[in-house]
Amino acid sequence: MTRHAIKIGNHPRLLTYTLSVLTMTVWAITAGAADSRQVFSGETHNWLRAVGKLKVPGQRYREGRRSHYVEDCSATLVSRAGRSEADTIVTAWHCLEWYDDLTKPITFTAVSISGELVQREAHRLQDGGGMHADWAILRLRIAVPGAQIVALQVHPDRADPNHPVTMAGFSKDDGLGAGGIALTFDADCTITEQKRSFGDTDCTAFKGASGGAVVQLSDDGEPLFCGVISQGNGAGRSTFVPVSGFRNALNLHVN
């Protein structure tokens, strides 16, 4: 994926909007790629219960008119080792780009071990501020007990490119994702490139999976959160933001 610097006069909002349109276009192109995903059922990869659906109310102004809508994304519940509950989720910055009405709550919904829906309101703590750092950290109003959902621990380093990763989120495609209803995941993917600010994989994901989890198993088989899904293209490639790109923020906010 070729990346170019873009400058549009002195209008940062216009630049942000342009980047968002480009991202949406990239996700749309992905629909033609081969689908190697599976639908999460809870029978395997049970740790994927930590990946939930994120609904973000937003508003845009076009030609002097304001329009309201809801951004459908994904997010991952994370915590430090040994904690009995978790109140921190990680998603993509662009999922919150148009959120500016604090009277309307952001909601995170995931499925518990017993199969019940767990829903929490969330508020933003810190984010990367643009597509160049497409991550965001949010705090849940009420923590989720580990007896309901086991949060993922954060990878202590960068993901090992010599080991596979799993990418999971609520893709809004009309196939396996069922329009964003089903949690889908692509296991045993390969990291094809990894730098501090981005990583590329051969995983399959679609729009709606933004903000979802990139997970790698440790040598002991423990699932570790190693990145947040950002975007994809039509060449069997999905891009993520490695935890190394925002580790300081994670260390500051994750309980």
Image (spheres, rainbow, N blue to C red):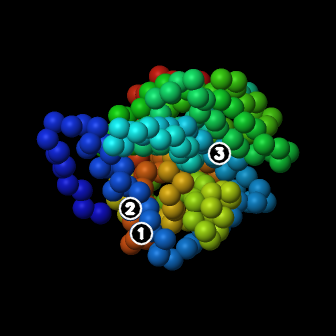
Measure the C-alpha gap from mark 3 to mark 2.
24 Å
Foreground of the two, 245 or 139: 139
Return the residue at label 1.
29
> Residue 212, percent across and down?
55, 49
Return the residue at label 3.
52
- Element under label 1? helix
* Vertical position of residue 86 compared to residue 229: above or below: above
Return the residue at label 2.
25
Measure the C-alpha gap from mark 1 to mark 3.
24 Å
- Classify residue 197 by image quadrant: top left
Residue drawn where x is 63% and y is 46% of the image: 53
Q: Residues within 10 Å of mark 2 (few under 14, many from 20)?
A: some
Q: Residues within 10 Å of mark 1 (few under 14, many from 20)?
A: some
Disc 1 or 3, which lies upstream in sequence? 1
> Residue 217, percent across and down?
58, 52
Measure the C-alpha gap from mark 1 to mark 2.
6 Å
Q: Amino acid at mark 3?
A: Gly
* Vertical position of residue 208 compared to residue 190: above or below: above
